Image: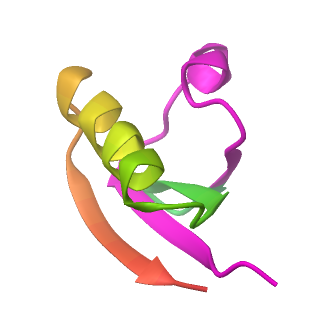
């Protein structure tokens, strides 16, 4: 079974952006958006992190699930 990752960003990301993060489940905690995704490989994770950077979102944490 593949390991999953929990990626948290500051604030609530509008659900319209969900299409930008293909294969990522999005949920919300207090003042954070939480991405839950498969840790397929490093390139996939870097792609998600690059999208977060490109959208100028504030990364809070990246943790295994």
Q: Which residues are magenta?
A: 1-27
Q: Is residue 18 left or right of residue 51?
A: right
Q: Is residue 57 left or right of residue 24?
A: left
Q: Position of 1 compared to 58: left or right?
A: right
- The magenta stretch spans residue 20: yes
Is residue 17 placed above or below 6 in the rendered structure? above
Q: Residue at x 38, y 60 (%)?
A: 42
Tally the marks.
Answer: 0
In the rendered image, which quarter is residue 47 located in? top left
Judge whether 34 appears above or below 16 on screen: below
Image coordinates of residue 16 in percent, x first then y, are 64, 13
Return the x and y of residue 18 as percentages of the image width and height.
64, 25
Quadrant (top left/top right/bottom left/bottom right) for the N terminus: bottom right
Q: At which x and y percent is residue 19?
A: 66, 18
Q: Residue at x 49, y 32 (%)?
A: 13
Q: Is residue 43 above or below residue 37?
A: above
Q: Residue at x 61, y 86 (%)?
A: 65
Residue in view at x 72 percent, y 40 percent: 23
Residue 17, quarter of picture:
top right
Residue 7 image offset from top left, x and y in percent: 45, 63
């Amino acid at each position: 079974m593949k390991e999953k990752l929990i990626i948290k960003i500051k604030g609530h990301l509008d659900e319209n952006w969900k299409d930008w993060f293909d294969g990522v489940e999005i949920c919300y905690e207090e003042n954070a958006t939480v991405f839950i995704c498969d840790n397929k490989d490093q390139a996939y994770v870097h792609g998600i992190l690059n999208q977060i950077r490109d959208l100028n979102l504030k990364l809070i944490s990246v943790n295994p699930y």
